[in-house]
């Protein structure tokens, strides 16, 4: 399953990753690679790059037009980046909860997305954002949550 996320999805992921006030270079590189894999270019890619340097507020992002698949993938990618260093602090946890509310998926679907992240994290290099296989996460999410595909 291809990565198909709009600019606001990537901005939401950046907001969660920035929640603790720090975005490491390898995390930033991973996010920019994901944005490119999503087909973002020009002004949209520049907005993601700026957000990785300066941060962005979740409240400034509109996720209302996302499909259920995009909501699940956005949440899964944000969860992955929040967990990358092995510790989710209170700020990151708060942002993840807020993002979960914003995407509006049932708690069990959010937990399945977390489970997909765990599965992919166990792959070689899965704990390193510069080595993230975003397509593998999308495929694992498709297997764990087939009900998200094709729904709005």
Image: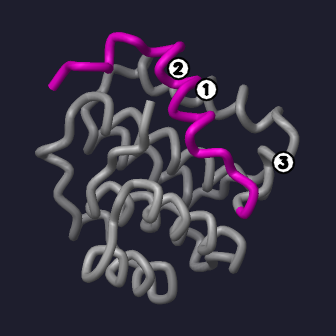
Q: Is residue 64 above or below residue 41?
A: above
The residue that mark 2 highlights is 112
The secondary structure that most of the magenta stretch takes on is: helix
Q: Are marks 2 and 1 in contact (CB under 8 Å)?
A: yes
**SS assignment at label 1:** helix
Disc 2 crowd rating (10 Å Cα; few below 14, some 14-19, many 20+) is: some
The residue that mark 1 highlights is 116
Disc 1 crowd rating (10 Å Cα; few below 14, some 14-19, many 20+) is: many
- Residue at screen point 71% across, 33% down: 120
> Quarter holding the C terminus?
top left
Q: Nearer the viewer, mark 2 or mark 1?
A: 1
Sequence-wise first label, 2 or 3: 2
Q: Is residue 9 above or below residue 26?
A: above
**SS assignment at label 3:** loop
Q: Are marks 1 and 3 in contact (CB under 8 Å)?
A: no
Asked which colour scheme the image uses, the reply is one colour
Q: Position of residue 15 (x, y in %)?
A: 43, 66
Residues in magenta?
Answer: 130-152
Q: Check residue 40 in the rendering and tell me which mark sits there, or answer none.
A: none
Q: Could you tell me how far apart the alpha carbons at marks 2 and 3 are, in whole angstroms? A: 21 Å
Residue 141 lies in the magenta stretch? yes
- Residue at screen point 30% across, 27% down: 105
Between 19 and 29, the residue placed more toward the observer is: 29
Residue 64 lies in the magenta stretch? no
Q: Position of residue 51 (x, y in %)?
A: 41, 80
Disc 3 crowd rating (10 Å Cα; few below 14, some 14-19, many 20+) is: few
Q: Position of residue 23 (x, y in %)?
A: 62, 76
């Amino acid at each position: 399953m291809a990565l198909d996320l709009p600019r606001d999805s990537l901005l939401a992921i950046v907001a969660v990753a920035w929640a603790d006030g720090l975005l490491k270079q390898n995390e930033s590189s991973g996010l920019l690679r994901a944005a490119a894999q999503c087909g973002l270019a020009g002004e949209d890619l520049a907005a993601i790059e700026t957000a990785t340097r300066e941060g962005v507020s979740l409240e400034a992002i509109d996720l209302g037009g996302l499909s259920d698949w995009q909501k699940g993938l956005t949440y899964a990618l944000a969860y992955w980046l929040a967990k990358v260093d092995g510790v989710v602090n209170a700020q990151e946890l708060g942002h993840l909860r807020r993002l979960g509310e914003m995407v509006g998926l049932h708690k069990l679907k959010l937990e399945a997305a977390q489970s997909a992240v765990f599965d992919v994290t166990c792959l070689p290099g899965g704990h390193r954002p510069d080595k993230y296989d975003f397509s593998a996460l999308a495929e694992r999410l498709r297997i764990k949550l087939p009900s998200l595909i094709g729904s709005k």
